[in-house]
Image (tube, rainbow, N blue to C red):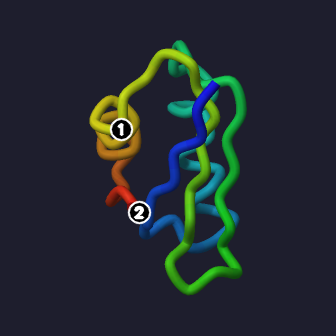
Amino acid sequence: MKTLKFKTNINCSGCVAGVSPHLNNAEGIEKWDVDTANPQKVLTIETDKLSEEEVINVVTKAGFKAEKIS
């Protein structure tokens, strides 16, 4: 299992509700969380299958932006 972190523009509970179905239905995501209190709105993903690019694609399809935090 690996943990990936992304800076996003998911900044409120409405945004979290909008992205939830996409992240919940993405095969390979075991657990996810968005820290909306963090200025960078950090999305943390736990996965054993998905690459960073694949997670970014899921978030983009939901209408949001995600950028890998190194």
Is residue 23 placed above or below 44 in the rendered structure?
A: above
Question: Which corner quadrant of the image does residue 39 belong to?
Answer: bottom right
- Residue 21 appears left or right of 49: right
The amino acid type of the residue labelled 1 equals: Glu
The amino acid type of the residue labelled 2 equals: Ile
- Residue 64 appears left or right of 24: left
Q: Position of residue 14 (x, y in %)?
A: 63, 62
Q: How many marks?
A: 2
Is residue 20 placed above or below 48 in the rendered structure?
A: below
Q: Give the distance between the C-alpha atoms of the residues marked 1 and 2, in whole angstroms.
A: 10 Å
Q: What residue sits right under mark 2 in the picture?
A: 69
- The one nearer the camera, 14 or 28, is 28
Q: Earlier in the sequence, mark 1 or mark 2?
A: 1
Q: Secondary structure at mark 1?
A: helix
Quadrant housing the N terminus: top right
In the rendered structure, find residue 52 and report the number of the disc placed on it.
1
Using a 10 Å C-alpha cutoff, classify the residue at mark 1 as few (fewer than 14 neighbours), some (14 to 19) or many (20 or more): some
Q: Position of residue 2 (x, y in %)?
A: 58, 32
Residue farthest toward the bottom in the current orientation of the protein: 39
- The one nearer the camera, 52 or 66, is 52
Query: Which residue is found at the position 69% from the left and 24% from the top?
Result: 30
Q: Secondary structure at mark 2?
A: loop
- The one nearer the camera, 16 or 38, is 38
Query: Which residue is found at the position 34% from the left and 50% from the top?
Result: 63
